[in-house]
Amino acid sequence: MSTATGAPAASADTTNSPATTACHAGDEHAAATTTASPRTGTPTPKTTGRARGWQLRFAVLSLIWGFSFLFIKVGTQGFAPLQVTLGRVAFGALVLLAMVVIKRERLPRSPRTWAHLTVAAFFLNALPFSLFAYSELTIPSTLAGICNATSPLWGMALSVVALSEDRPSRRRVAGLGLGFLGVLTVLGAWQGFAGTDLTGTAMALGASLSYAIGWIYVRRTLAGVQHSHLSMSSAQLLLATAQLAVVTPLFTTAPADYPIVPLLAVFALGALGTGFAFLIQYGLVAEIGPTTAQMVTYFIPVIATAAGVALLHEQLSWNTPAGALIVLAGAALTQSKPRPKGPSLPRPGSTSD
């Protein structure tokens, strides 16, 4: 989901708006949702009377995003992939725009901001959402959910090239290698990728790569923009809807009918997985901080796999969950930071200057 200067600290098949990317990374936008500790002066998450219930909202968010890949699969059974994606961003935009009206906020006015959001909408919404929808025509939703978890790996690899201030530690490089080893495990590389549709898998991995490109672009262009998360995300989804509204009629024909189950799946994908889920995430970041909130990323492939196997009866071989665990371990390492070294204690008998 969610941005302005954040490095890709987490990923999900979500809104992925400028507001949410920053929340994941704990940058300037995320700092607006924190307060300073009276003792140390360091930012600490705000606490409210509802903070004790964050675990329930965390679980709901994990379920919504985990089920998104099932909704995509069901949606493409009744509609073309581009139509699924158009419905997704349109329903999501309606939810966020309704909240903009309720909260009496304003969308950005600067042409420069809208220009950068247009690019962000393409790389963070229109392109990856479409690629995931096309990929699930030929690969299971479980595999798409696991491919989604590679976004932090792509992000770290690209940030080394695009962000000169972001130098990886040995631990993060090891996480990158471990993560892609997990991808090879999922795909069964030792079997020559037998039984795996490489085109569909490449599309799903390309969607995750697109997220990383979008995050870095936003970090370089929209840092310090003075707009709320809700305002920026609403504008971005509105632009993604406009992009897909132009492209979809060129490559698809209007549906002859609207089967109820795929239609409900597209509605749930947009209104819940792309609109309502952002509102939940925004509240979580404000209450518990971006570091804890981004942990939802590691539950998404687990839930996507369970949903695909239990409800869609997708086949699951041993290497799929094993590889997924390796991918998640690698992604966690790429996002880890070394513990700050404490001040050294004076040696016995030493004197201070």
Image (cartoon, rainbow, N blue to C red):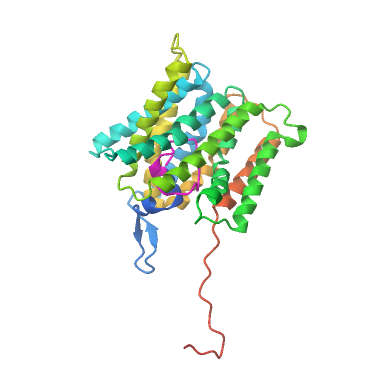
Residue 153 in view: yes
Residue at 37 percent of width and 26 percent of height: 242
Question: Residue 152 appears in which quarter of the rendering?
Answer: top right
Q: Residue furthest left?
A: 104
The percent coordinates of residue 310 (x first, y second) are 59, 28
Q: Residue at x 53, y 34 (%)?
A: 207
Residue that lies at the very extreme toward the top in this rendered image: 256
Is 353 rendered above or below residue 4?
A: below
Place of residue 297 in the rendered image (x, y in percent of width and height, measured from the top left)? 52, 43
Q: Quadrant of the N terminus?
A: top left
Q: Residue at x 76, y 36 (%)?
A: 190
Is residue 104 left or right of 42 when viewed as pictured?
A: left
Residue depicted at x 56% and y 85%: 347
In x, y percent, where is residue 18?
Answer: 39, 42
- The part of the chain drawn in magenta is 1-20
- The stretch drawn in magenta includes residue 14: yes
Q: Is residue 92 magenta?
A: no
Residue 3 visible to an observer of this rendering: no
**Could you say which quadrant of the image residue 142 lies in?**
top right
Q: In the picture provided, is 75 more to the left or to the right than 176?
A: left
| Front residue (pair 150, 111) | 111
Picture quadrant where residue 88 is located = top left
Q: Main secondary structure of the magenta part?
A: loop
| Between 112 and 159, the one nearer to me in the picture | 112
Residue 58 in picture, x, y percent from top left: 45, 43
Q: Residue furthest right?
A: 191
